[in-house]
Each structure stands twice: as C-alpha cells, then as structure tokens.
C-alpha cells in the first residue's frame, strides 16, 4: 500500500476502517493506474497485475466462463478486454462481497481440511477470537518484499506477465526472512 | 502521476474510462464518486440486483455430483445468467451430501436455505467446469479419414455414422491400404435375436461346461442344435457362445445409470457377454478378495458374493493402520475422510499409522510412519497375524461364532468360518469344508430356495468342546460356538479349522524373516500389532490400491482383511463398514418402476467372455493343459488389462467390433502401449467406435467418435463408497446446456451422446425394448430421460418415500433450470414419466440426490446400514480354483506370495531386474486424476508438470539434481517411450525432483501428466489443422516402463487370482537426457 502513488481512502488503495470490510486492504480498480509498484513492494506476494490473459487464449476458442464477470468489492466486473480490472493491480479482498452476505471467504469454506478460520479479532465472541484464546498462536513476523531483497527496484518496462514471473506469483509460496517492514497479519494456530 | 501507463492507443486508463463513459454512457461521470457511492451502499446493503452477488441466489444454483475423480462428491454449480443463457462460473460442495459435509445438512432443509452454505471441494472439483467448457471438445460425429491413430478426421452426419456401423461396407476405402477392406457391421454380429433359441442354446452350453467328456458333449450339442449352429462362433467350441459375443464393449469411469443403460443394450438385448469394466486397473484385487470373503453358503456351495470391499469408519475409528491407501490426496476422498479424521488426529482421539514407501501427506499427520518395501505388504500382515494369534490378542468370541445364531447371541452382526473344519488332501493341503454327512451325521436335507426350487442342503462342521457339531451358517436360532484351533481326523478324513490354517500360514516364517522381507523392524511390527489390539473393534486396517496392485494383490488384501476379522471390527461403529445406497432399478415394495422387469423380448447372453471370467479353464472345451495361453478368471471379472490384448491374441476368439466408453487403457494401464499396437491394427480390431468428449489418448485410435456429454450435462447414479456410513444415492443430473449437436432418434430431437448412440443403434437394429413401447405398452423408451427420470422416482421411493416438493420448491426447480433446452429438459414430459411421484422426483433433484440423515447412520454402537452376513476367513471357492498357468491350486487363506510373473517365476530369474536398480511406483496427487483432468487449466497452473521423484541418496549416487531431465527405461521398454504409431512417439522423459519423501531405491511420478492426445496433439478435422496445446503435453507418464509379462508378451504383469494389474513391481533405470 505504501508504495502506491495514488493511495488513500477512495483512491487506488487503502485499508478500510468502515463496515464489514474493516481491516481489508482495498483496491479501487477505477483509480489504479497499473504501475505495478505495489506488486513489487508487497511482502506477502499478495498482489499481482492483471495482464488480461485468458487460460484459453491460445486454444480453439476463448471460453465464456473466462469473460464472465467476477464480483469484487461489491460490484460486478465483466472480464472482457479492455475493461477493468484488466490492467489493474489485484489482490485478495477477503471476499467482501460474501462477507456482506454473511458468508465466510471462499478460502475458508473451501478448505478440505478445515484448516483456516476467519472472523473479527476484536469480537471476543467470534470463532477466531475463541480459537486464539484456546490455542497457542504464533504470529508470522518475518516477511520480505521483492523490493527489500533488491531483486526488483523498478517496474518500468515490465509487462504484467514479466512482473508476475519475477515476483513468483502466482507462485511457490511466500519467502520468510527475519525482518519485515510490513505489519504482520498471518496467524497460525498451533494445537 | 508520471507513472501512468499509456496503452497502445496512447490513452491512459483515466482517459480511456472517461472516453468510454461518454461514448457508452454506462458509467457515471465521476468514477471516484461512483465507486465511493457503491462502496457505501454495499456496506449498507443497498445494492441493486444488478450489482449484487448473483451466484448465491438459489435459482442460480444446481446440485449435482462431481466426476473429476471417482469419489463423486456432491457439488453445487453456480450460474451467471444472461437472457436465457447461463454459464457455470463456480463449483462448491453440496451441503446435503455427506461426501463433502460433516455432518451434512438435514435432508428436509428447504433447498432455498442452502444457497449460502458452500461446502469444501477439492481443487479438481472446483475446476470441473473446465472439463465441460473445454475448447478441445468435439461437438459433431467424426470419422477417421486417415490410418488409425493418424489423427486425421472428417465430420460425418450422425445418421450416416450409425448406418455405416450397422451395415457392412468398405468404410475406409479412402484410406491407403484399406481400399478393399470390408468392415462387418453390427447387424452381422447381432445375429441371434430370438430369445427362445438363445435360452435353448444357453442351456446346451451349460451342459457342455458341466460335462466331464467334452468331446461327447460337443457332439451331442451339435446334433441337438444342428439347425442353430450358424449362430455360434465355433460349433466345435459351443461354450464360446453366439456370434453376438464378437461385439466387445469396455469402459472406464462409468457409474450407475449409464451402467444400467448399457447393460440393457449390450447384455439384455444385443446379447453379448463381452462387456467389461476397468476394475482391475484401479483396485481389482481389493474388490475380488473381498468378494471371495463375502461369498455365501447357498445350495451346497459358495456363491452370491458382492463385488465390493470394506473401509474404515474414518470418523469413529480410534486406530487406523493405513496401508497403501493414500488418504488426504485420494481414497474417497479428501473432503470426506480428511474432515472426519483431522479433528480426531489433532485431539489425539484417533491414532494413525501409515505404511507406504512414500511419505505421503497422511504420513505427515500420522503417529507412526513405516516405509515398507514395495510388494511385501503380505509379509507385514502375516507378521501381525502371527503376533496376534501367538499373544491371544484377537476377538475370540467373535471368531468362535460359527453361524448367525451365535453371532446374534454375541451381539455381532457378522460371523466367520474360523471354526469350521476344512478337509486336507493327502499332502495336508486344505481344500473344501468338511460336510457333516461325509462323516456320518446330520444327513443332507431337502430345502427350498427363495425361488421355491428344491435343493440338497449339506451341513458343515465345527468342533464344540472337541466334539463335531453340524453348522448351518444362516441358522439364527441354533447357535454354534466352535473351537478355534483344531487339528483332527474323523472317519479317516483329516481336517483343520480355518483359524488353525491361518495360524500355520502365519507361522511359516519367523518374525525376523517376515521383518526382513517387508523391511519393517520387528519392534515396529510388534508395536503396531499391540496398538491394533489395544483399540480392538475401533481399530481398522484400511487399505487400498497400494497393496492391491501387485502380482500378489489378492493375498495382500486377504491378509489385511484377516487382521480385521481377528479384531472383530466388522459392522461396528469405528470399525470396518460397507457402502449402502438407495436403489435405482426398482423392484422393491413401493417403487414404481421395476426396470429389471420392464424388458419386453429380453434375450439371454451366454458363453465364455473373451476375457474368460467367471469360468474355470478346466471346465471348458479349450482346456489343453498348462500353461494356458492367457489367464482364466474364476474369481475376478472386469479384468481391464485383458480386454484389448485378448482381442489381439484372438483368445479365445476374435472380436469383430469394439465400443469403448470413458476408458483410456493405452494411458491408464501399466504397459498400456501394448494396447496401442492392437487398437491400431484394423485386422485385429475391424471396427472401433466410441463416445468421448474429446479426442482422447485411446479414442484417437477409433474409427468413429460420437460426441458425448461431460459430467455436467448428463445423468448418472453415483452410488457410494465403503467408508460412508450414511445410506446415499447422489444423482448426477443435467446442469448446463448440452454442447453436442442435436440429432433425431425415434423421431425425437435430442443431443448426441452415449445414450443417443445406443438408442439409435437399437432403432436401426430393430431391437425390442426400445421405441414407442420400449418399457411396456404405452411406456416409451426413446430418450435418456425416459430411463433416468424413472430411476430417480425409484430412488425417491426406496423404503420410506421422500416428501413431496411444495409449490415453492417446484418453482425453484423450474426457475433454476430455465436455461436448459427442451431437448434435454421438458418438465411436462418428465412429470408424465414420473406420474404420481413427480414432486418426489423434484425433491430429490433439488438436493442432488437422496441422503440419509447423519444422526440415522448409526444405531447404538453399530452402523445402521450393516453388511450383516458371513465373512469367509477361509475361502472355499478360491481354494477350488487353479492357476491356469501352473495348474497349482490357489490358496483359500491369507498368505504371503512373492512378486512373480504369470508363470510363477521371480522377476530376477526372468531377466527383468539386472541393470535396473530403481523400484518404480506411481501415485495420485490431489491436483490430478487419471487421464482426464489435464484439460483443467486452473489446476494445471498450480502444477504445470509432474516430476520423477527420488530420494537424495539415489540422486547423489546417480549424480542427478533437481530439474535434470531423465528418461525412464526398463527391461521391457528399453527405448523408454510410447510408440503412438504413424511415426509418432512420446518419450518417457521428466524432470527430476529430489525429495526425502521417497524411500531410498524407490522412485515415483504422479498420475495425470505426460499426455499425447486429449488436446495435447495437433489433429486434422475436415482438412483443417487444429493445433494442440503444449500445456497439456507436459510432464511424464511412465506407465509404459512397467513390466510386460514375459509369457503374455502383450500385457502388463498381473495378479492371476484377483485380476489387479501390477503397478508397483517394476524395476527401472534413469537415463539422463
């Protein structure tokens, strides 16, 4: 977020403090200029640039499910070139569109081992707060961004695909170091 | 904002948006304002329907069943609608279905209330819509326009293709070399059509099979049926049956419904016995060992066994010994068993020991991991049996219950023959059970069977306090509690009890010797045995294909299940349980459609199938001593590795036409490349037609491919799996619009598919049982739904019928299907078919099947759905069979057999091992399944290719490192490649991944990559080249390195008793490329 030249509430990216999206770092695709700086700076490799590619691009026919809309930040986004969010930075939005319907994020409902929990940390009655109270939890503190590691200092001239390759996204998982500028937000619950 | 990116037209994003806003007028002038407003309204819940999350609406959700692997999890498919079109965008788990939800939603919950409950589904399940929406799908019938496998095709009209297949002709006159080749049509094969004559001939053949003097019996047959001999394949061998048997049908992943559909066509009407499934490529010896254990004593002999197996009650077991069963990645399935197991593993309620040469994901969560030598599971089990018997850590009360009465008194639902006496031959070898009348008591009784036919009932014998007593296994009144360890001689007949035989088998080697064979220390074996015994009826030995897919698979499984019998855990909560399903075919009280009887003019199929199953070599006119040319299978069926090679050898007779469905033996089988040579040979396989959703790794060798439905477009009755305690019948149904061309059959417009092909053939061949009065007068059978809606009505009315859907549910039913065309969905027609049960049908379909409630799955300490019968610890039927290769008797009890070729020789003495130091395995990862999921780009993105996995020690010795490319080579595939014919080859080359999960000396690769078709190769259709997608050709598929049996020469090594193919016995070397 810090790296964004257009940051701030209602601008390209900001951390929400209101309503059901509280705590979620949001992106407003209509304000994002697609510079890719946040992608390089993100220590969690959580962001990427949408290059507008389709999986079925080089096949006999691009399929309708690829150009159908997605629902993000409470809006329907048809994925047809050159409409947004193609060209913009994208990241996990904790399924805000589901949260407001009273549903947990997709990654929680879809885990075949029921490994993850989601909820309001400040609400003592929430499942996650209870789980953290009952179990030993450890906060992962040490994540380094590609920029910090000096691998990428500029995004100039890099296409979304080239950037993704350099970042390793979608990739082989985060790389943990000893120091991190970013505030940790990943909790592991240990039995 | 200097960093603003300019697009190709020189506009930056803001300019572009402003521009399009003005032109299109669809966006607000101020983007920022608009977005902020949207956010605000979203938070306040004030979004318009246009902006809201449409995928959670009940009318945009349909419940069906996955088929990305055989688990068949319940899924909900969510749609985005535009006008009358709908595209599936998201697949999640169906909360009603216990394969994804634990506990699952109460069945009575209104389907409107489930739209916001998403259950977990594995990555393959989520990407399933890419199987349906695959750009490489075929939508029109194609016929080969080049040599078999050349991948040159031409589209052809459905009617013409059906006509060509039915009638004779020079069908491939345009192909060089086949100008004068006349292909026999189905009408020449479907010659015996008269049910009465078929019945007569069938009786005649049965007499020949029974006769001792075959020559005389054949002569008698030829005289008696002189006027019908033209129907027979070979009058000198009447037991081969009618010419109809030269139609061969084999399939891979087929479930109930479609299975019943084709059984009717090929079995009941076409009259061919040659219909074979793929069981032995999956876990055949597990099925057939359990079948042998489930054979029941009927009419003086054993029969009626279930082709099935048992698995652990995962949620309630307190100790699971998981051997060769890849929990977490596979094994019916992660979203069912993981969820039941994980909380218990974390809380410590359940202990898990994993035995596998690969440290798999379940090993990572286990209390103990034992890296066993591949193929020696039997030795490990025998060691455990030895320890349990020696230390008296077995359930003696259970084992001593010799019949139903005793079981009842002991509170058991099942019982065993552990105490029954088995007669010994002069060498002391056990054979048949002692019959009481043979030793002078309990004479033969005249009894009547269920059909009212009289038969002789012979009592069996057990010793009670040292005295012989008569045993009637199913007598639930007179309990017989037998002595367990007996060696005796009565009236000159030597005999031993079943358990005595097993003890002696377990004691043939010392604990140290067993330990040396399996590579697990005596201490580890004993600790495992101690723990198993400690948890008793809540202990399970849970096994799967890892132990079954060896040449000794049948006896490995018998060993594992024998331990379960010693534990007495069958039909106990936390013990071994069996699958239970709601009936689809009818015939039970209250069910409206008895599909078994709605078969006017049904014929009899008879004769030896060309894989020679359910028959003893010695009983046939083909018996010429040992070794037989190929195996005979009295215990197993659906022996997949036999289907194509038997056609290749024309043993016992040549095939004239082949139809295959959703099977890829060339890819799936070990040494599957041997099947390519045969399928590509028009002399061995004169006609080969198939249905497929694309040009697959086997169907590329077909003459005609009819486009089929993907699993999201079709009907099927998924059934259940053994670890599921609840009674279920998940129903796969139409959820997306069909993608195949519309054709006309019986005057009805319908999409081309598997069913339409059979209906059209039935129409063309003028078959009874189809058309206007297909089921009965006034009950037409002209479309798939004529069959399947009836089945759903049966499911809805099995036992206590389901409730009727109310108006609200009926409206939802219609609304959620409004995108389906009339060719497949016509509620008025369906209502007419279902009649009074229409609203029950709706109720079931709105929920994706029928599911017993979670709380009803158990009654006290036992499962509600019981197996509830005799389980054979000693298998008389098996002991009555001989190896067709060596003529030696097959043992009827748990024992350890080393890995051998069909002739009983070790691989080493057969010259297969020297120079090939590495043991090759293959395994499943959750991200791929068999030959069909490589088309799913979302999972392919996560794992673009697979690897040759090997241990660091081996890598060091071979000087290999991560990323090195190696070729897998064995003694029976020295070039390390698939020969695809027509000059094309696919090398078995993959990248090395060094990992400590592999036992040193053992290598593996995951199944699912290394394709040469399925959209991976260029094909020509109507002269136009369709480029293949290189992403589908990545990675390695090393099945062709697996050993070919030296005697059979065109087939992989195999388990000659249980039928399993040998997946895990081959030794290979790696050659750096």
Image (spheres, coloured by chain):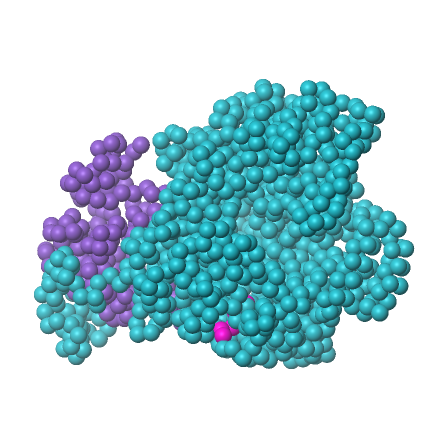
> What residue is drawn where x is 34% and y is 61%?
B806
Residue B364 drawn in magenta: no
Q: Quadrant of residue B165?
A: bottom right
Residue B261 position in % (x across, y down): 57, 63
Q: Can residue B442 be seen in this view?
A: yes
Find chain A in the image and tell me its colour. Answer: purple
- Image coordinates of residue B50 in percent, x first then y, are 21, 68
Q: Residue at x 10, y 56 (%)?
A: A9
In the image, residue B700 sits, relative to residue B376, either above or below, namely below
Segment tinted magenta in the rendering: B750-754
Instruction: Report which quarter residue B589 is drawn in.
Output: bottom right
Query: In the picture, residue B236 is in which quadrant?
Result: bottom right
**Above/below status of B297 relative to A69:** above
Quarter the N terminus of chain B occupies: bottom left
For the residue pair B632 and B539, the one nearer the viewer reads as: B539
Judge from the rendering whether residue B553 lies leftward or rightward of residue B924; answer left or right. right
């Amino acid at each position: 977020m810090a790296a964004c030249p257009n940051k701030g509430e209602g601008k390209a990216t900001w951390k929400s403090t209101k309503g059901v999206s509280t705590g979620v770092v949001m992106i407003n695709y209509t304000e994002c200029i697609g510079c890719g700086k946040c992608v390089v700076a993100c220590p969690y490799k959580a962001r990427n640039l949408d290059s507008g590619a389709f999986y079925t691009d080089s096949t006999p026919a691009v399929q309708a499910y690829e150009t159908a809309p997605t629902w993000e930040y409470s809006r329907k986004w048809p994925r047809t070139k050159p409409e947004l969010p193609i060209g913009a930075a994208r990241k996990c939005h904790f399924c805000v569109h589901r949260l407001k319907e009273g549903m947990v994020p997709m990654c929680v409902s879809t885990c075949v081992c029921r490994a993850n929990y989601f909820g309001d940390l400040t609400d003592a009655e929430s499942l996650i707060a209870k789980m953290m109270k009952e179990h030993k939890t450890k906060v992962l503190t040490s994540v380094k961004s590609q920029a910090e590691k000096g691998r990428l200092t500029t995004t100039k001239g890099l296409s979304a695909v080239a950037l993704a390759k350099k970042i390793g996204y979608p990739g082989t998982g985060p790389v943990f170091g000893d120091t991190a500028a970013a505030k940790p937000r990943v909790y592991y619950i240990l039995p | 904002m200097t960093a603003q990116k300019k697009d190709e037209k020189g506009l930056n994003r803001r300019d572009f948006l402003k521009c399009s806003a003005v032109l299109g007028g669809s966006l607000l002038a101020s983007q920022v304002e608009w977005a902020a407003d949207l956010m605000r309204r979203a938070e306040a819940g004030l979004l318009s329907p246009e902006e809201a999350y449409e995928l959670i609406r009940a009318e945009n959700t349909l419940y069906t069943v996955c088929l990305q692997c055989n688990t068949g999890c319940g899924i909900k498919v969510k749609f985005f609608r535009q006008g009358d079109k709908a595209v599936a965008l998201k697949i999640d788990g169906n909360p009603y279905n216990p394969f994804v939800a634990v506990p699952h939603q109460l069945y009575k919950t209104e389907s409107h209330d489930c739209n916001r409950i998403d259950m977990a589904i594995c990555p393959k399940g989520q990407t399933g819509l890419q199987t349906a929406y695959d750009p490489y799908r075929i939508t029109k019938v194609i016929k080969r326009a080049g040599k078999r496998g050349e991948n040159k095709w031409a589209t052809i009209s459905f009617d013409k293709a059906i006509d060509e297949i039915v009638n004779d002709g020079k069908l491939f006159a345009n192909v060089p070399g086949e100008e004068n080749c006349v292909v026999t049509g189905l009408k020449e094969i479907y010659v015996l059509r008269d049910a009465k004559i078929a019945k007569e001939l069938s009786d005649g053949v049965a007499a020949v099979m029974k006769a001792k003097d075959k020559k005389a019996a054949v002569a008698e047959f030829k005289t008696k049926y002189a006027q019908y001999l033209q129907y027979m394949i070979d009058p000198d061998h009447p037991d081969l049956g009618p010419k109809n048997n030269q139609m061969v049908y084999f399939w891979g992943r087929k479930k109930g419904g479609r299975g019943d559909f084709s059984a009717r066509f090929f079995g009941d009407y076409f009259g061919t016995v040659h219909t074979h499934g793929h069981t032995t490529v999956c876990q055949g010896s597990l099925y057939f060992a359990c079948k042998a254990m489930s054979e029941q004593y009927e009419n003086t002999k054993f029969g009626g066994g279930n082709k099935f197996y048992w698995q652990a009650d995962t949620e309630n077991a307190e100790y699971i010994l998981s051997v060769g069963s890849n929990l977490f990645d596979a094994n019916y399935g992660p979203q069912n068993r993981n969820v039941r197991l994980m909380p218990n593993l974390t809380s410590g309620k359940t202990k898990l020991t994993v035995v596998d040469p690969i440290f798999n994901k379940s090993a990572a969560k286990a209390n103990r991991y034992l890296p066993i030598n591949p193929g020696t599971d039997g030795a490990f089990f025998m060691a455990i049996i030895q320890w349990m018997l020696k230390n008296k850590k077995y359930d003696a009360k259970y084992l001593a219950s010799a019949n139903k009465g005793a079981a009842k008194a002991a509170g058991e639902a099942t019982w065993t023959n552990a105490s029954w006496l088995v007669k010994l031959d002069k060498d002391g070898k056990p054979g048949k059970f002692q019959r009481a009348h043979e030793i002078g008591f309990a004479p033969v009784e005249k009894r009547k069977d269920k059909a009212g036919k009289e038969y002789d009932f012979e009592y069996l014998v057990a010793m009670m306090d040292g005295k012989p007593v008569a045993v009637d296994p199913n007598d639930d009144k007179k309990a017989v509690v037998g002595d367990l360890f007996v060696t005796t001689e009565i009236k000159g007949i030597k005999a031993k009890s079943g358990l005595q035989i097993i003890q002696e088998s377990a004691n043939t080697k010392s604990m140290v010797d067993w330990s040396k064979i399996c590579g697990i220390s005596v201490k580890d074996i004993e600790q495992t045995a101690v723990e198993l015994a400690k948890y008793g009826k809540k202990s399970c030995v849970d096994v799967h294909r890892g132990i079954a897919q060896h040449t000794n698979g049948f006896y490995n499984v018998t060993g594992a299940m024998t331990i379960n019998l010693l534990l007495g855990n069958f039909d106990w909560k936390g013990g071994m349980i069996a699958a239970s399903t709601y009936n689809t075919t009818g015939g039970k009280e209250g069910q409206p459609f008895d599909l078994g009887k709605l078969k006017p003019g049904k014929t009899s199929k008879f004769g030896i199938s060309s894989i020679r199953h359910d028959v003893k070599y010695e009983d046939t006119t083909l018996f010429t001593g040992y070794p037989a040319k190929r195996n005979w299978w009295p215990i197993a069926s659906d022996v997949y590795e036999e289907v194509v090679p038997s056609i290749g050898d024309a043993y016992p007779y040549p095939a004239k036409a082949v139809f295959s469905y959703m099977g890829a033996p060339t890819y799936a089988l070990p040494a599957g490349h041997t099947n390519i040579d045969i399928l590509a040979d028009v002399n061995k396989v004169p006609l080969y037609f198939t249905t497929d959703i694309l040009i697959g790794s086997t169907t590329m060798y077909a003459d005609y491919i009819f486009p089929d439905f993907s699993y999201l477009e079709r009907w099927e009755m998924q059934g259940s799996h053994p670890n599921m305690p609840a009674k279920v019948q998940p129903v796969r149904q139409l959820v997306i619009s069909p993608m195949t061309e519309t054709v006309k059959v019986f005057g009805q417009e319908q999409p081309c598919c598997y069913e339409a092909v059979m209906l059209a053939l039935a129409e063309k061949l003028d078959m009874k049982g189809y058309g206007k009065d297909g089921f009965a007068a006034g009950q037409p059978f002209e479309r798939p739904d004529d069959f399947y809606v009836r089945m759903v009505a049966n499911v809805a009315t099995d036992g206590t019928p389901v409730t009727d859907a109310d108006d609200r549910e009926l409206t939802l039913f219609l609304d959620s299907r409004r995108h389906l065309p009339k060719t497949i969905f016509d509620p008025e027609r369906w209502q007419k078919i279902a009649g009074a049960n229409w609203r029950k049908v709706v109720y079931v379909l709105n929920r994706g099947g029928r599911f017993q409630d979670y709380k009803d799955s158990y009654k006290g300490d036992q499962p509600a759905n019981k197996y509830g019968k005799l389980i054979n610890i000693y298998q008389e039927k098996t002991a009555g069979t001989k190896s067709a290769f060596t003529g030696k008797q097959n043992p009827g009890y748990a024992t350890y057999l080393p890995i051998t070729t069909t002739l009983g020789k070790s691989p080493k003495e057969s010259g297969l091992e020297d120079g090939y130091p590495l043991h090759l395995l293959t395994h499943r990862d959750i991200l791929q399944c068999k030959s069909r999921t490589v088309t799913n780009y979302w999972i392919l993105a996560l794992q673009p290719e697979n690897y040759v996995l090997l241990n660091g020690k081996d890598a060091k010795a071979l000087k290999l490192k991560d990323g090195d490319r190696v070729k897998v080579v064995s003694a029976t595939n020295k070039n390390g490649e698939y020969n695809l014919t027509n000059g094309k080859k696919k090398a078995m080359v993959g990248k090395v991944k060094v990992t400590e999960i592999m036992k040193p000396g053992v290598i593996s690769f995951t199944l699912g990559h290394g394709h040469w078709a399925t959209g991976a190769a260029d094909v020509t259709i109507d002269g136009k080249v369709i480029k293949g997608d290189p992403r589908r050709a990545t990675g390695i598929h090393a099945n062709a390195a697996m050993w070919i049996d030296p005697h059979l020469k065109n087939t992989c090594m195999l388990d000659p008793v249980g039928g399993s193919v040998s997946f895990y016995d081959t030794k290979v070397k790696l050659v750096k490329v």
